[in-house]
Amino acid sequence: MTSKTNATSRRFTGWHMLAICVASFGVIIAVNVTMAVKAVRSFPGLEVQNSYVASQEFDMRRAAQEALGWSVYATARGDSVRLEISDRQGNPVEVASLTATLGRATQVRDDQTPAFVYDGAAYVAKAALAPGNWNIRMIARAADGTEFQQRVILHVKG
């Protein structure tokens, strides 16, 4: 008789199936809620206050930037970042002013504002960078007052 009672106690019932389904969906819902909370907490905020006004000015700013003909290239070596701005002929450009924010694309916790200094060929600044992808969000002003904005991607090897 013991073999019969062991066989009955190990039967797969509807309650077992219900428990498996509830546990599976519970894990899925918990992961989704966790990911949603992390996404909302890491969102840096608004890019512009009024998107309509920004769209009206976009074409004018883009045309002015393209008229400058500048190209920007960034590299990192050791504890310094090098930002090369060149004209159509490939000559280095010295701008009237340069501000930049160096940070990760996904969150603002690692953002830094390096003090770039022109060395005759490029702008160089000290920065503590961990390996991975970084963005330099720069705003440079030409001698004639034209504003040049660009996001430059910088890859730091480990």
Image (cartoon, rainbow, N blue to C red):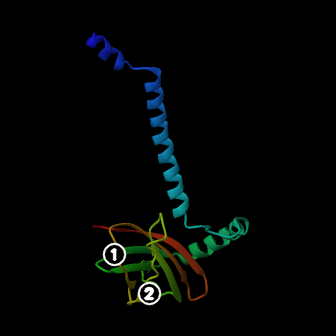
In three-dimensional space, the C-alpha distance between marks 1 and 2, rounded to whole angstroms, equals 15 Å
Q: Is mark 2 on a helix, strand or loop?
A: loop
From the top left corner, tell me how far across and down residue 111 is, in percent: 46, 75
Q: Earlier in the sequence, mark 1 or mark 2?
A: 1
Horizontally, is 54 left or right of 125 in the view? Answer: right
Taking 11 as reference, is 39 above or below it?
below
Q: Could you tell me the amino acid type at mark 1?
A: Ala
**Residue 122 seen:** no
Q: In which quarter of the image is residue 52?
A: bottom right
133 or 4, which is in the foreground?
4
From the top left corner, tell me how far across and down residue 105 is, in percent: 47, 65
Residue drawn at the location 42% of the way across and 82% of the way down? 91
Q: Residue 115 carries which label?
A: 2
Residue drawn at the location 61% of the way across and 86% of the way down? 145
102 or 97, which is in the foreground?
102
From the top left corner, tell me how far across and down residue 26 is, in percent: 49, 40
Q: Is mark 1 on a helix, strand or loop?
A: strand
Horizontally, is 144 left or right of 105 in the view? Answer: right
158 or 28, which is in the foreground?
28
Quadrant placement of the N terminus: top left
Q: Could you tell me the amino acid type at mark 2?
A: Ala
- Count of numbered circles on the image: 2
From the top left corner, tell me how far across and down residue 74 is, in percent: 39, 74
**Residue 106 seen:** yes
Q: Quadrant of residue 75?
A: bottom left
Q: Residue 76 carries which label?
A: 1
Q: Residue 23 carries which label?
A: none
Residue drawn at the location 33% of the way across and 75% of the way down? 76
Please report contact status of discs 1 and 2: CB closer than 8 Å, yes or no. no
Quadrant placement of the C terminus: bottom left
Badge 2 crowding class, 10 Å Cα cut-off, few under 14, some 14 to 19, many 20 or more, is: some
Badge 1 crowding class, 10 Å Cα cut-off, few under 14, some 14 to 19, many 20 or more, is: some
